[in-house]
Amino acid sequence: MFTPAIAEQRFVLESIVRLSEISAEAGEITDAVLEGAGLFAAGEWAPLDRLGDTHGPKWSEQGVTMPAGYAAAYKAYVEGGWGTIGSPAEYGGQGLPVSLSIAVLETLGTANMGFALAPILTVGAIEALAHHGTPEQQALYLPKLATGEWTGTMNLTEPQAGSDVGALKSKAEPVGDGTFRIKGTKIFISFGDHDMADNIVHLVLARTPDAPEGTKGLSLFLVPKYRLNPDGTPGDFNDVRTVSIEHKMGLHASPTCVLSFGDHDDCIGELIGGEMGGIRAMFTMMNNARLNVGLQGVQVAERATQRAVAYARERVQGVRAGAPAAIVEHPDVRRMLLRMKAQTQAARALVYYAFGQLDRGRAGDKAAQARVELLTPLAKAHGTDLGNEVASLGVQVHGGMGYIEETGAAQHFRDARITPIYEGTNGIQAADLVGRKLGMDNGGTLLALLDQMRREAEDAELLRLIDACEEVGRHLLGADTDDRLAASYPFLTMLSVATCGWLMEHQGRVAARSEGDPAFLKMKAAAARFYVEQIVPEAMGLKAAAMAPAELLYSIDAEAFAV
Amino acid sequence: MFTPAIAEQRFVLESIVRLSEISAEAGEITDAVLEGAGLFAAGEWAPLDRLGDTHGPKWSEQGVTMPAGYAAAYKAYVEGGWGTIGSPAEYGGQGLPVSLSIAVLETLGTANMGFALAPILTVGAIEALAHHGTPEQQALYLPKLATGEWTGTMNLTEPQAGSDVGALKSKAEPVGDGTFRIKGTKIFISFGDHDMADNIVHLVLARTPDAPEGTKGLSLFLVPKYRLNPDGTPGDFNDVRTVSIEHKMGLHASPTCVLSFGDHDDCIGELIGGEMGGIRAMFTMMNNARLNVGLQGVQVAERATQRAVAYARERVQGVRAGAPAAIVEHPDVRRMLLRMKAQTQAARALVYYAFGQLDRGRAGDKAAQARVELLTPLAKAHGTDLGNEVASLGVQVHGGMGYIEETGAAQHFRDARITPIYEGTNGIQAADLVGRKLGMDNGGTLLALLDQMRREAEDAELLRLIDACEEVGRHLLGADTDDRLAASYPFLTMLSVATCGWLMEHQGRVAARSEGDPAFLKMKAAAARFYVEQIVPEAMGLKAAAMAPAELLYSIDAEAFAV
C-alpha cells in the first residue's frame, strides 16, 4: 500500500526546483537516490507504520521503548546513510542540496509519517549547531547527528508557554565552568526519549538568572541525555527524566514526551549561540522544521491518495455503462481522487520550491533567501492544510470502511491533524506572513514573487487571483495590526493557492512538451488543469475575508461567545 | 463543558421554523421542553460522553454490554418521556411537531453524540412502521418504540453492498404462515445490539425468492431480537447473532455491529410495506434519518464550539493592549471562534428549516413537502460537512492540547467524521440533489426556493450567489448524467451556503428588531454578518467547478491514478 512517488519527485526536482542548476552532482545522482530511498522505505519503514499506530511507544521509569522493529529499522536507516544526504560534508555528511535530502525525507515519511519525525528533529539540531555551535560542540556532536547515530530534539513548549514562547520559565544557572545547570519541565517533546540511539541531543530554551522577560531573555542550551566522556562517547546520565508520553489522537509512532530537566539538580547544559541568543538560534532550527512540517503535509497526502486510489480501483459498487464498476469510475469519486492528486502535487510543488529557494539562498542568492522566508509560512500552513484535506477525502473515498481503523485511511486522517498545530500553529504562520514577511523590503519580496507569477501565468482566473493577492497585500501593508491579523489566514490561503496555481500551471506546460511515461504525463496534465480550473477559482472566494477589517470580530465581547 | 443551546434553539424555532404556526400547543410549551431536555441531558447524558469514547461497548458471545451508566441513563430517558415527544399520539407518543422533537434530539446529541444515535434509529423504525406497517404490527410494536422502551435499527449494508443497496443478498424465504425466514449478514448496524432495552426491532432489507436483482427486488422485514409472545412481551430469541463490534475511529459510544441473521435457520421476520416494497419503506426511514444525521452535524459543531470557547477564554498566551490576554482576544482565534459560531448557527438554521418544512408537508402543504425533499440532501451533506469543519477548528483553537485525547476536542473531531459517510455518503446526497431533486417539477421546486430567497435577500453578494445557483441549476437541468454528477458536490455546497446565507441574514434582521438578552442578540447579529460577509463569498468560488463538465475527470484512465 506504499509506493515511493519517484516519477513525481523527479519531475518536481527537474521542473520546479531545477536541481541540476543548484548542484550538477545532485542532478546526476537524483535517480539513484530516489530509487534507493524508495526501496529502503518500502522494505524497512512502511511495514512498521500500522504497528506504530496500534502499538505505540511505551513509557516506563527506565525510559521509552519503541514498538518492535523500530530500533532495527532506525539502525538500518543510519547504516544506509540516509541521514547523511543533506548533512554538512565536513562532519561526515554528503553535503548535498537540501532539496534532494527532503525528497528522501518525503519518501520516509510517506512510508511512516510518525517515524520520520525523528530525522526531522535531528536535522533541526544539526542546523542549530552548525550555525550557532562552537567548534568544539560541532566537533563533538555533529558527526554523530549527521549520520543519525544520535537524534536531536527541540525543547520549547512548557505548560504555560505554547505559542507564547516568551512566557517560558525553565532556568539555567551558571555552574562556574562555562556550563549551566538546567531546571524545568518541557512538554510536547517529539522523540524526547526512545531506545533507537546511544544518545539524544536536547536543545532546550531556558532563561539565565536576571535574564529579561519575554523572548529576548531566552538562551538555547545543548543538553545531551548522556554527558560526553572526554573521548566523545556517551557517559553519565544527565538527569533528564521522561515523565510521560502524551495520549495523542494520532502520530502514535512518535513518542511525544514530557521531559523534566534537573530533578536532582544534576542536569548540565552548554550555551549555543550566546546568552540571550536563544530566539535567534531557535528560529534557525524552526524555519527548517517548519518547511519540513509542510513536507509532512505532502507525505500524508501522498499516502492517503495512494490508499484511496487502490481502494477505489478495487471496490465495485453500482454500474456504469451497463456493467458493474469499480468506484473509481463514478464521477464524484473521480472528482475526489483527482482533487487528491492535484492537491498533493500542489503541496509538493510549493514545499519543494521553497526548499529550492533555500538551497539557492545558501549559495548566496539573496532574492532566493528572501523568497524562502516569505514562502515558509505558506509551505508550513498550506502544506499541512492540504495534507488534512486530502487525508479527509481519503476517508471519504473509502465510505464506511474509511471509518474502520483496520482499513488504514483513518490513521492518516488522525496522523495529519497535528501538522497544522506544531512548529507554530497555522495561525502563527499567518501572523508571521502578515507581520514580518509581508513587510520584508517594504513589500518588495512579495511583489517580486507576484510579478514573476504574473509574467509566467497564462490562465485568466489565475491572473485574476494573482492580481487579487497584490491588491490584498498592498492593502494589508497599510493596515493596522488587528486588521492585518484578522485577514491573515484568508490571505495566506489565497497567496498559497496562487503560488501553487503558478507552479501547477508551469508543470502542466512542462508535461505537455515532455517525453516519458504517457500515463504519468497525462495525469500531471489533468491534475494541473484541475488545479487551475477548479481550485484556483475557489481561492478568489477568500478575498472578501482577506479585505475585511477586524471590526466585526471585536463587535462582541469575549463573554458573548459563550451564549 | 456542556450547556444546552436553549436561546439559540428558541430563536431558530421562532424565527426560522415559526413553530407556533405549525402547532400553537408546541409553541406554548417550547420553553419548558427545551429547558427540561437541557437539564436532563446535562445531568444524565453529558457526563457519560467521555466514558463512552474511552470505554466503549463490549462484545461477548452473550451480546453487547454498554459502558457503565448507559443503561441507567437510557432508562431515565425513557421514563422522562423524552422519546415520546414526536411519536404518534395514537401509540402513546405526544404527537408534537418533529421540529420540536429534534430540538430535544439536538440537545441529547450535543451532550452525547454517540448515545443519541439510539433514539435516531428508533425514530426511523417508528416512521417505517407508522407508514408501512399493518395495524397489527403497529399495535404490537409502536407503543414500545414510541416511548423508547424498545429501540430500532436499520439493516441495509452488507459487505458487498454499501452505497450500492441494490447489490444486497440477504434472503427471506416464506415460511407459509405469512412470515419469512431471514438469512444474511449485515454490517455497520448502529446499536445493532446493546443491553439497554428489553427488545430491539431490526428493520432488515432482504430479497424474497425469485425477486429481481437491484433495488426493485428488495423487501423490508421487521425482525425483532426476541419474538413477541401473544401478549406482546418479548419471548424466544430470534436467531439474530451479534458477530462483532467494529473498531471505529470515533463515535465509540455507539456499538456498530455486524449482525448475522438466521445462523440456525430460525430467524423469523414479517414483511413491512409489501413484497418488493422495501426501497420505498426504506426511504421513509432514511429521509428522516438523513435529516437527523444533518442534525448530528449541528450537535457536534455546538459541542466543539462550546469547548473551544471555554478553552479560549481560559487559556492565557501573549499580550494584548499591554496585558496578558486570553487567546479569545487574539484576532485569528476570534476569527476561528466566530466562524465556528456562524457555521454552527447556519447548520442549525438549515436543518431546522428543513424539519419545519417536513412538519408543514405532513400537515398537507405540498410545496413544503417538495421543499423538504429538495433540502434533505443539503441538510445531510452540508450539515455534516459543517460539523466536521467546526470540530476541526475546535481542535485548532486548542493548539497542542487539541491533539491530546484528554482535552476532549479530539473526540469531537473523530466523532464527527462518520457523519458525511453514513445514511448515504455526502457524494450520494449530491447525486440525489442533481438526480431526483433537481428535476422535481422540472426544476420548479428549486426555482421556487431561489425565488423566495431572491425576494428576501438584501446583501449584494448573497444575491449574486443566489443568481449563480440558478444559473448552475438551469445548466445542470439540461446537462447529461456525467456532467451533472461531476458538478454535483460543488453545486450542493453552493446551494447550501446560499440557503444558509438567506436564513442567517433573516436571523440577523430578526435579532436587530428583537428584545432580549443583549449578549445573545449581539452574537447572533455578528454571526449573521460574518456568514453573509465572509462565508457567502467563498461559495462563489465553487461556481467554476459546478459549471465544469466531466470531461476532465475522464481524460485519464483509472490506472493513471496509481502513477
Image (cartoon, coloured by chain):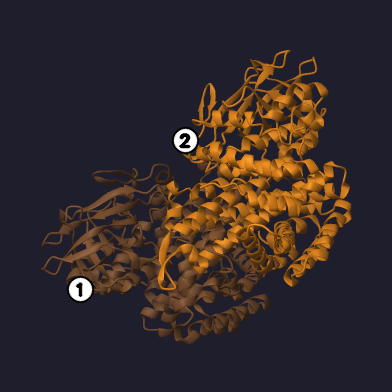
Chain colours: A brown, B orange
Q: Position of residue B449 (x, y in %)?
A: 82, 58
Mark 2 burial class by Cα count in 10 Å: few <14, some 14-19, many 20+: few
Q: Amino acid at mark 1?
A: Thr
* Residue A134's disc number: 1
* Residue A106's disc number: none
Q: Is residue A161 left or right of residue A435?
A: left
Q: CA distance from mark 1 to mark 2?
A: 52 Å
Q: Give the total number of marks visible in the rendering.
A: 2
Visible in this render: residue A11? Answer: no
Q: Position of residue A267 (x, y in %)?
A: 18, 58
Q: Are marks 1 and 2 on the same chain?
A: no
Residue at mark 2: B55
- At x 39%, y 80%, the residue is A361
Check the image and report above or below for B276 versus B283: above
The label nearer to you, 1 versus 2, is 2
Q: Position of residue B178 (x, y in %)?
A: 80, 18
